[in-house]
Image (tube, grey):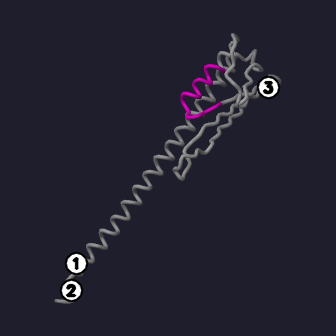
Amino acid sequence: MKKQQGAGLIEVMVTVLILGTSLLALAALQSKSLQYNHSAYLRSQANILAYDILDRARINRANVASYSLGVDDAKPTGGTLAQQDMNEWLTNVETMLPGADGGIECVSATSFCTVTIQWGEQNSSGDANEDESEFVYTTRL
């Protein structure tokens, strides 16, 4: 019986070690899951915003060529419906996505429009640097 002394303690220590490692792995998995969920949420927001400006361009189809805005361009000013639409849309882009910018390019001859939205996301290493994400959608009005 003396050879068995402490064997139960070793079994308990091994069990605690395995359980602790499993809980750490579960916490890491949960953290990554939250990060990927947030990334998917931002992509969904970009999709909604792209459809928003395209719907605005569809309504104003007669002036579809006026919907031209580069990603790095300033907000348009002026009284035309297209300029007001793009101004409101860029405000929504900046509000709904962190550090975002957007642009649209419509060709009236073919009725094709391309919407580009860029925003920053925290990278997978979790440091202060951001990865640039981009959503590009092309459709025919």
Residue drawn at (26%, 73%) of the image: 12
Say what amino acid the circle numbered 3 marks. Answer: Val
The local secondary structure at tag 2 comes to helix
Q: Out of 9 and 45, give the one closest to the viewer.
A: 9
Find the distance from the CA under tag 2 to the CA under tag 3.
83 Å
Q: Which residue is mark 3?
A: 107
Circle 1 or circle 3, nearest the eye = 1
Measured from the top left, where is residue 52 in percent x and y?
Answer: 61, 25
Taking the image as shown, residue 12 lies to the left or right of residue 121, namely left
Q: Earlier in the sequence, mark 1 or mark 3?
A: 1
Q: Main secondary structure of the magenta part?
A: helix
For the point 72% across and 31% down, which residue is it? 114
Residue annotated with mark 1: 8
Q: Secondary structure at mark 1?
A: helix
Write down the region rendered in magenta: 86-101
Rendering quarter of residue 5: bottom left
Left or right of 122: which side holds 22? Answer: left
Amino acid at pointer 1: Gly
Q: Which residue is mark 2?
A: 4
Residue lying furthest right in this view?
Answer: 109
